Amino acid sequence: MERIREPIRVAVVFGPGRAVKPVWFEWRRRKHTITQTTYSWSDRVGDDTRLHFSVTDGKALFELVYSTTRQNWELLNLQAE
């Protein structure tokens, strides 16, 4: 995986309870439609809870991270096929 660490825009659907489902994101002026979330997890860095999503657009695998404290999204990693 290639480390990216760049801010991105993400569209999400909020489900029942605390469910969050990313549906597309923009990175470097390109929109990527998410076809599948392969895995999701959370971690903590200090007081910040971060939500991680491993997603694919059918061409590459991306790790998206949402900071609940800063309320922003970041593309953390990319694995191109």
Image (cartoon, helix red, strand yellow):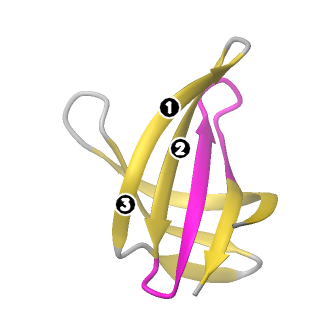
Residue under the point 54% across and 72% down? 61
**Amino acid identity at mark 1:** Ser
Residue under the point 50% across and 88% down? 59
Of labels 2 and 3, earlier in sequence is: 3
> Tag 2: Cα neighbours inside 10 Å, few (<14), some, or many (≥20)?
many
The answer to whether the residue labelled 1 contacts the one labelled 2, judged by CB atoms less than 8 Å apart, is yes
Q: Which residue lies under the disc numbered 2?
A: 52
Distance between the alpha carbons at the discs numbered 3 and 1:
14 Å
**Amino acid identity at mark 2:** His
Say left or right for 4 vs 56. Answer: right
Numbered disc 2: secondary structure = strand
Q: Which residue lies under the disc numbered 1?
A: 42
Say left or right for 54 vs 68. Answer: left
* Residue lying farthest to the left in this orientation: 16
> Tag 1: Cα neighbours inside 10 Å, few (<14), some, or many (≥20)?
few
* Secondary structure mostly seen in the magenta stretch: strand
Numbered mark located on residue 38 in the image: 3
